[in-house]
Image: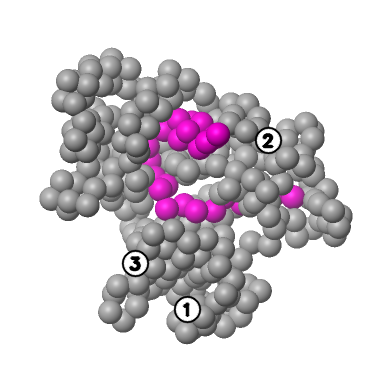
Amino acid sequence: MTPFSIPYFADEANLPASLPTAEEIASSTDLLSETGGRRVVGVGDHYVVKYGMRVDLLEGETMLLLERSTTVPVPRVYAMYQSADKKVNYIVMERIIGSTLKSEWTRLDQSAKEAVSFQLRAIISEMRKLESPGGYCSVGRRELSDDLFWTNDPTKPFAGPFDTESDLNNAVIAKYLESGYSRYKADHYARTFEQLFQNHGPVFSHADFQKKNIMIRKRSTAETMEEDGMCWNAANVEGVLIDWEFAGWYPSYWEYSRAILGCGLWEDDWSYWVDQILEPFRVEYAWTEQLFRELWS
């Protein structure tokens, strides 16, 4: 599984319009999201651009792999490159015309939620067909991108790649200690992990499976949507997963644990449907929830 060459530009024949220039990207007022070192903007009718000093082009490589090796619906990637001074990374991708599942969820009835969940379960099943290039890693057998492993000290890498689940467990404990927490509690976690976090093989995971990262768009063969919303059935809409920056081969419990953690304030029934879409790992979630919240506090 060879990483894609950077810079990457799709064949001009496959572009819906001329690629946006750096000036057009910087001047766009169609701001879709902004977090530290990352901006996502719309440029015209066809493009969304994710750019910034903390954008990792690995996300674009991941989407290209999915597009070329699976039937998982993802935004098409049209370009990936760096600014001349190599300080800013750009991913130019397809603009998905639709709305997020988060914005639509409260409008859905039981049958609509069943239809969406059926599609998402099929997408997850297709994702799982991507075999790991070796252990727990991201595309190209590089480090995992989940921000659990992030550190501002480059001399203390915690993100792998990992040959075994035990290696990954040890890195999590090391990150816990590096964050300044009690070594006695770290020992407690280590004993627990040694017993509980074993035999979870590496599976390809989105690793940020939340409603905000699922777009719902009309299928190309569907009739025009109703003015007050979409005609919610599996025949005329499809889910498209976006925001692949954390994706990679994680232990099999990781996707579920992260998804339930993403329920946030538990203001709706999304957690029930996560149980229908993903294989539940309830005990593993309970322990990861405790540890993750400590690391994020």
Span of residues in magenta: 237-265
Q: Is residue 260 magenta?
A: yes
Residue type at mark 2: give it. Answer: Phe
Residue ID for mark 3: 53
Give the residue displayed 48% in from the left and 61% down from the top. Answer: 34
Nearer the N terminus, badge 2 or badge 3? 3
Q: Which residue is mark 2?
A: 118
Where does label 1 land, which residue?
26
Q: Quadrant of residue 6?
A: bottom left
Of tags 2 and 1, which is closer to the observer?
1
Horizontal side, residue 152 vs residue 289: left or right: left
Residue 261 against residue 46 in the figure, above or below = above
Q: Dot 1 lies on which element?
A: helix
Instruction: Name the secondary structure under disc 2.
Output: helix
- The image quadrant that residue 45 belongs to is bottom right
Q: Is residue 201 above or below residue 43?
A: above
| Amino acid at pointer 3 | Met
Residue for point 32% across, 53% down: 140
What is the CA distance from the residue labelled 2 to the residue labelled 1? Answer: 39 Å
Residue density around tag 3, few if under 14, some if 14–19, many if 20 or more, within 10 Å? some
**In the rendered structure, which disc, 2 or 1, sits on the residue that comes first in sequence?**
1
